[in-house]
Amino acid sequence: MSQLPTPNPPVTADSLPFWEGATDDRLVLPRCNGCAEVIWYPRHFCPRCGSADVSWFEASGQGSIYSFTVVERGQGRWAEHSPYVLAYVELAEGPRVLTNIIDTDPDSLSIGDVVHASFDHSEDGRGVLRFTVR
Amino acid sequence: MSYGHGMGLRGAAHIAGVYEHPGRHLPDLTVAQIHAQVAAGALADAGLSFSDVDAYYCAGDAPGFGGLSMADYLGISCRGIDSTESGGSSYLIHVQHAAQAIAAGHCNVALITLAGKPRTGGAGPGGSISQSAPESGFENLFGLNVVAGYALAAQRHIYEFGTTSAQLAEIKVAASQHASHNPHAFLPDAVTIEEVLESPMIARPLHRLDSCVITDGGGALVVVSPEIAATLSRHTIPVLGTGAAVKHSTAGRIDLSHTGASISGPAAFAEARVHPADIDYASIYDSFTITVLITLEDLGFCAKGEGGRFVADGGLLAPFGRLPFNTDGGGLCNNHPANRGGMTKVIEAVRQRRGEAAEAVQVPDCELALAHGTGGSLATRMGSATLVLGREL
Ligand SMILES: [Zn+2]
């Protein structure tokens, strides 16, 4: 649980299974039934092979930091939360996802660090996927 | 002359006129007025008039409905129109599309304009993802801003290749030395590596002085057929090679170490039938210092990972560095109108080819110039475009 801004996410029919999982703190991703690619960002379409036939499964929530930055001067409502950590986390299932690393000292982080999914909840109860080092 | 199937666009069109608005702070002009002023400037430079124009090109900075509002405002009788939007790379793609249309006989005189007022018009720094974009729910919730997105690429480059902040600062230093010879530059003072590193950190490792300026202004290009070019007294510059690419996030297998320049660059060199080592001057898109460094590698001016060493020790300084770049001071110091640097990249490349850059930074015998544009978010979802502007055929 972080204090970062967590607005209600723009849930669409295309991404609904992801948001339903996130509501219950589960990371649910689409996998292509045509080529087995795990697809990010979540949608009913595989950009690798063009198939619209996907299945949704619960991912491990494990990953490692692919890159990160400490934002010293955020914009808008993020200004008062600076500094904060913006990162790409490489999920164990393959995709690299944009996220925040929370509950950590930014100066202690390194690329390659192992991280775990942690959901912050918006006013409407949806989960926003962030990561902790633990 | 014919440009049949698979022949490419080599020499299919010439850039006959260019104009960069001298203003950087334009509170009293509308965006449409700035489009009109730069259009008139580029046509005058070419020795042509509005009645000669038969195709109009603009991107998302043009006010109104695609290209229709500005074509109507300017009174252009269009046989062709194109409002391709790929951020800062749009205007280089417009040059490619204009050359295609000219080669096909669909038009003879194409006008391309850019204008905007991010300083005084209320628009933000740009680059944000609209709520209607399908990716918005997965990228808008985390405090991503333009600087932070580029900082992520810079951090990865430092991690993979040992690039240093001082090497990135060298890019700003070279641009600032060039800007000191440009009376219109927004930041006209040369800075040192130390001054870059001591400027406020915005998103690690990028400092304020690793970033481009925010300016009102605009620019325009006139692209013509070789037949029209032959009738003009102005020195026209043949378009030898063009390349365009859209790089994806690849179902999430994001690769922050490569940009679309690794596709658009080789395409442009192949079409021009030249190699990176042949280039005398390069305009490289410079929204941030890291943008330049990765792009130089992707265009083949040095090997992947060698960008830091390539730019060090004045490697980009005109007129005698390894590769003189952005001799107007670039987006980093001179001008980044409408938060889109592609137009000014083409304009300075044409100045260099004509021998009309500032005297102190004019590359002697500049026969081959390159211009590269970048749009969108670096390495993740972006448009890239490369032009090779050449010697006479
Ligand atoms: Zn597939």
Image (cartoon, rainbow, N blue to C red):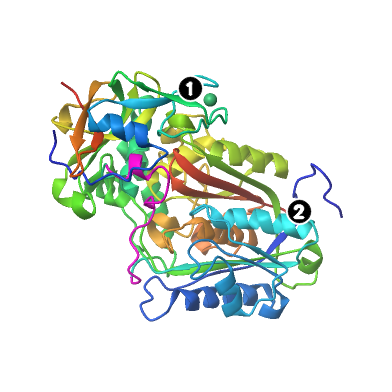
Comparing B23 with A20, the one in front is: A20
Q: Is residue B164 magenta?
A: no
Comparing A121 with B184, the one in front is: A121
Amino acid type, residue under disc 2 in the picture: Gly
Q: Position of residue A21 (x, y in %)?
A: 29, 29
Tell whether B31 sits left or right of B154.
Answer: right
Tell whether B68 sits left or right of A3.
Answer: right
- Of the numbered discs in the image, which one, if any, rests on residue B11? 2
Q: Is residue B145 above or below residue B183?
A: above
Residue contact between numbered discs 1 and 2, judged by CB atoms under 8 Å: no
Question: What's the residue at 36%, 61% (across, down)?
Answer: B214
Q: Secondary structure at mark 2?
A: loop
Q: Which residue is mark 1?
A: A37
Q: Is residue B126 magenta?
A: yes
Amino acid type, residue under disc 1 in the picture: Glu
Chain identifier of the residue bearing label 1 in the image? A
